[in-house]
Each structure stands twice: as C-alpha cells, then as structure tokens.
Image (spheres, grey):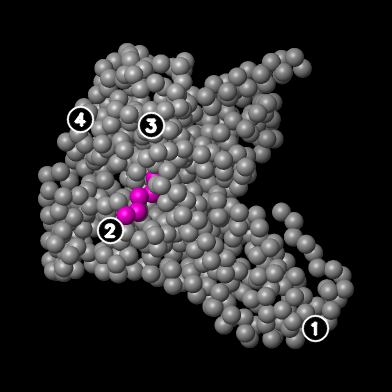
Amino acid sequence: MRARGARRWLDFTVGLVLCAALLFPLYWMVNVSLTQPQDLLSTPPHLFPANPTFAGYAHALDTQLPNLVTSVVIGVGAVVLTLAIALPAAYGMAKLRAPGTGVVMFLFLLAQMIPGIVLVMALFAIYNSLGLLNSYAGLILADSTASVPLAVIVLRAFMTQIPDELLEAATIDGAGRVRSFVSIVVPLSRNAIVTSALFAFLFAWADFLNARSLTTGNSIVPFTLGLYRFIGAQTTDWNSVMATAVLASVPATVLLLIAQRYVAAGVTAGAVKD
Amino acid sequence: VTVAQPSTAVRVVANAQLPAVRRHLRRRTRLAAVGFILPVLVFLAVFFVYPIIRSVVLSTQDWRFASFVTGEAPFVGLQNYVTVLTDPIFATVAWHTVVFTVVSLAGQFVLGLALAMFFTRRFPLSATFRSLILLPWLLPIIVSATVWRWMFNQDFGIVNAALGTQIGWLSDPRYALWAVIIANIWLGIPFNMVLLHGGLQGIPESLYEAAALDGAGPWRKFRSITWPLLRPVTAVTLLLGLVYTIKVFDIIWVMTGGGPVNSSHTLATWSYQLSFEDQHELGLGSAAGQLLVVVALVFGLIYIRAQRKEALS
C-alpha cells in the first residue's frame, strides 16, 4: 500500500515536471512581458521578473487594442455565420436524411486536406474581382471555411442521437419541420452548439493566413497581423510584443479553462469521428 | 448528454398514427431536407469547389502584380509548372519540405506517444496536467511563433543561454530549418498526445495484467501489446499529421520568413512568397501549390481508407 502511494506521488512529480517543461515557452512569454526593457538585453536572461513592469501591457493596449477589437468582431461574425450554415445542414443530414449527405461529408474531409495557402491564392483572385479584399465580410467568410466543416461534423454526430419519436410526436402536434428544428433540435443540441461556436471563434481569432493575404494596408488589421508587423519592424520593444502575445492568448486560455471537455472533443472530432 | 424522452401518452398517439405520419413525412421530407442543407451546399460550392478549380486555372495563367489592377491574366498553359520545376531553388525547397515533414512527424509522434503512455497512469491531477498540455495547440500560432522567435534570439535568447552557445538559430542558414522544426514539434505534441491517448484507452487492461502474470516486462508489454494494438490509431495519427505538416505556413513565415537565403523555405512558404511577395505571381505560386495539393490528397485518401478500416474493426 505504501509502495503504491509512493509510486503515485512519483508519477505526480514526473507529470508536473513534464507539464512545466512543455509549457515553459508560455511561462517565458509572461516573464518577458513583465521584464524591464533594459533587463531584456542582459545575458543570461532573467529567469523571473524580479522587478516587474506593466509598461509593456500599457503600450500593448495603447497600440493593439483596436486590432483586438477587430479580431473580436471577425470572430463573432464567424461564429454567427458558421452556426447559421451548419445548424440547418446538420439537422437536414441527421434527421431528414438529406440526399447527398455522404458526398458533402466526403467533400468536407477533402476540404480539410487542401492546404490553406492554395485556397487563399484563389480567394485573393476571386476577392479581387468581387471587391471583397479589405472587407470584414471577406475575412469572416474565409475564416468560416475552417469552422463550417468541423461544426457540421460535431452537430450532425450529436443530432443523430436525438430520438426520432420526439420529432414525430411534434409533427403530430402540428409542428412543421422549421418549428421542430427551432424549438426541439436546437435547444437540445446546446452542448454541441457551444463546442462548434468555441472552435469557430478560436479559428477566426487565430487566423493569420487570411488576414495577411486578403487585406492590404491598414483598413482592417486583426491582432495577428498587428503582432506580425510589430515583430517585423525589428523592434527592440520585446516586452510590449510579449504583452500583446499574452493578451492574444487570453481567449484560448479562458475557453480551455471553462470548456475543457469540449476542447478534447474538438481535437478528435476531425480525426476520429465519421 | 441526456435527451428528454417523450411522455408515454405522446408515444401511444404516435404509434397509432405512425404509418400515416411516416408516409406523409417521407413524401415531403426530401424536399425540406434539401432546403435545410442548401446553405452548406452553396458555401461548399463557393468556398471550396470553386476556389479549388480557380487555383488550378490560376496555375495556367500569367497572373502578376499588373493583373491586380487590370484583372487580365493571359493563359500560358503549363509554362508556370515548367518555371517552378526548373527553378534552381525548387529542389532545395522540396528537400526542406521532406526534412521538415519527416523530422516534425517523428518528433511529435515519439514525444506524443511517450506522454500519452505516461498519462494513462492514475495519479493526482493527471487529467488536469493532460488538458494544460493542450494549451499550446489552442493558442494562435503567431503567438507561439513570436515566443520561439525571441527564445531563439542569438544574443539574448534563453536557448543559447541554456546551452551556453552562440548559435544564430534564425540567422544562420545551417540552423534556421532546425529551429522551425523544433518549434513545430512542440506545437504538434498535444495533437499526437490526444489521439494516441484515446487509442491507448481502447486497449483492455486485462491484456497487460495477463502479460504481467506471464512475467512480461515493460518493453515486452509495449512490443507485444501496445504497439500492435495501437497500430490503426498510429496510422491515422501519422497520416493526418502528414497532411497537416506539409501545409504548415504560419510558424515558418513568422519565425524566419523562409530565410535566411531560402534556408528554411518549404513548398508551402515558397509558393506563398511567389504569390504574395515581390511581383505577386499568383500563377507561379498556384502551380507550386498544386504539387502540395497532390501530395496532400494522396495521403489524405490513404488516411480516409485507414480511418474506415479502424472504424470497422
């Protein structure tokens, strides 16, 4: 019994060390964000922010706040668009046995494999003709290409579990399909909707490729692009850079903390499920 | 997840009228179903099918900066492919892509598997540690790339300080590719760990107990039980990892931009540079990109087959 207890604590210690080692770069980000600028240029680097400063955060908020707001707008737009497309589609596939379901799911699998850089080249040419470059709509649509397939897969898998009798009963009571969808299927699918929405937001929030390629100049600058330009300027102001990076990490961290179980489900959704 | 059951009364009514209802439903359901999936069909057509066709068309056009304004891009047949394949940089870039992909995959897989196996043990906070390790996977890649860029800084970076070296990780052509590979392995560990951990959970505990009774040591258990039973999941993880790794763009672009002197360019970053830098030669970039598409689709289809097999077993 004692040997087993000791083994558990040994495992715990090893787990703690592994976790700390893997998360070290994130610790380093926070450390640098709090370090005095002159201390950043010391060798060896300071391992702890002994004399912390929040000047980096002040500067980051000063210059990057509009970009963070831009990213929130695009993220919320992507969530709305993704759900508007994926919810009815998942219902049609799971409950109404829509023709062509197999083809659509197969196309989604293939679509996830096409390199984003190739799609974005085509989108650039298309947007150039349509005047969609430098527009919120253009970025929201492009970012949704990542989240719509995942959302349909997650929502469809979930809706398949809703018993058919429930919907048949509603039909007998005179509810049409739209009514059944709105008042039965959507409320029951809350968990899957939360998962899909979280990932739609995170994908759009983290997008760099579309932001870098489908905008020119300064009309729309999501924070990813702002951060890229910040470090591209050969800056020495690394504590502001890292403060920006920390602020940009907040949504993902919060989502992981409040929605742990959904996150693991999302990681595996594209790979293991149907 | 619980779904409310219909009450008994509702069910009795439903059963009595079922045949009529079913017939009625079937007639109109097809039409309604099409209405529900119409938005996603349109979205698929406009944002996947059409761009894929358009990118193939682009690869046969002389699309450069002037086309941005005029919208005109003359048809040049396979000229872009010839230009790309005969470019002296192409062979270098193709080799980098192979090295980047193979070393990244191997590193992510071995470390991911080791972690997944470790975390099948039961100890306090095991699940919490496991989900904390997912954090790097969730962060915007540009955030991770920024941090690694500073950690790899030649003069003030923690990497050189810890190793006691003066290596120009990002500025020396001999090391830049390895620097982005290290960062990419770090990024890929959570993904591998989650998939493999799921696979390990599917192996019955009783097999290990029986092997222990027969006197099998840890290595023997791994060789005779874990590895063979994990094979389907291993195949899926590696194939999907490959499809994801050959298209990696953000981490390289932000850390090194493919440089110095093309030393860390892969096909993905190089084709992007052709398309979006200098002359905006979208035609050339798309031609180079099609090569990536072909590789991705070949391994993607193998992946889909492997996954079907796993689902059936």
Residue at (77, 80) in percent of width and height: A172
- The N terminus of chain A, quarter of image: top right
Q: Is residue B294 visible?
A: no
Q: Residues within 10 Å of mark 4 (few under 14, many from 20)?
A: some
| Kind of residue at disc 3 | Ser
Q: Disc 2 marks which residue?
A: A121
Q: Position of residue A57 (x, y in %)?
A: 44, 32
* Segment tinted magenta in the rendering: A219-223
Q: Mark 4 vs mark 3: give the one in front.
A: 3
| Kind of residue at disc 4 | Pro
| Kind of residue at disc 2 | Met
Q: Position of residue B181 (x, y in %)?
A: 34, 34
Q: Mark 2 vs mark 1: give the one in front.
A: 2
**Of B190 and B65, the residue lying toward us:** B65
Q: Disc 4 marks which residue?
A: B173
Numbered disc 3: what chain? A
Residue at (63, 30) in percent of width and height: B126
Q: Mark 3 vs mark 2: give the one in front.
A: 3
Q: Is residue B268 visible?
A: yes
Residue B17: assigned label: 1
Q: What secondary structure is marked by label 3? A: helix
Residue B195 versus residue B127 in the image, above or below: below
Are tags 3 and 2 found on a single chain? yes
Q: Disc 3 marks which residue?
A: A240
Are tags 2 and 4 found on a single chain? no
| Kind of residue at disc 1 | Gln
Dot 3 or dot 2, earlier in sequence: 2
Q: Look at the numbered discs 3 and 2 and tell me whether their residues touch, using CB distance below 8 Å.
A: no
Q: Look at the numbered discs 4 and 3 and tell me whether their residues touch, using CB distance below 8 Å.
A: no
